[in-house]
Amino acid sequence: MASAYQVIARRWRPQTFNDLVGQDHIVRTLRNAIESGRIAHAFLFVGPRGTGKTSTARIFAKALNAEGGPVRRTGSAIGNQQVDHGRELYGCHRD
């Protein structure tokens, strides 16, 4: 059986901050926020089509949802799979 169709943007979407191209200033800002533990209550990813807003937001969500907190580089398999597959994580609180 043939593999399921996947939109090209999802197939080639960057998976880590290191994979993002041309967004060094954004990557630096988000990494600094994560490493210093000063996460704002909201982030706006704004720009024209094709500039990496969704990819950056997904990578940032994976970093924030990582098992053991956002500073740790390895992430929770379940949480990151949900981000990778485009499932909503709204209202997901960890106690």
Image (cartoon, rainbow, N blue to C red):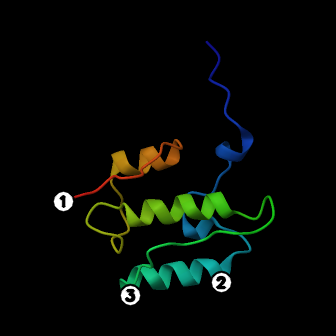
Of the two numbered discs 3 and 1 in the rendering, the one whose residue sits closer to the viewer: 1
Which amino acid, by three-letter code, is at mark 1? Asp
Who's the residue at 65% across and 83% down the image? 25
Check residue 25 in the rendering and tell me which mark sits there, or answer none.
2
Q: Quadrant of residue 23?
A: bottom right
Residue 36 screen position, x and y as percent: 38, 87
Residue 52 screen position, x and y as percent: 70, 63
Which amino acid, by three-letter code, is at mark 3? Ser
Check residue 36 in the rendering and tell me which mark sits there, or answer none.
3
CB under 8 Å between discs 3 and 2: no
Q: Which of the two discs, 3 and 2, labels the residue nearer the N terminus?
A: 2
Q: In the picture, which quadrant includes the C terminus? A: bottom left
**In 3D space, how far apart are the residues under numbered discs 1 and 2 (Cα atoms)?**
33 Å
Of the two numbered discs 1 and 2 in the rendering, the one whose residue sits closer to the viewer: 1
Who's the residue at 57% across and 62% down the image? 57
Q: Quadrant of residue 48?
A: bottom right
Q: In the picture, which quadrant includes the N terminus? A: top right
Who's the residue at 36% across and 70% down the image? 70
Residue 48, above or below 8: below
Instruction: Find the residue positioned furthest to the top.
Output: 1
Q: Which residue is under mark 1? A: 95
CB under 8 Å between discs 3 and 1: no
Who's the residue at 68% across and 27% down the image? 5
Residue 79 or residue 2, whichever sits in front: 79
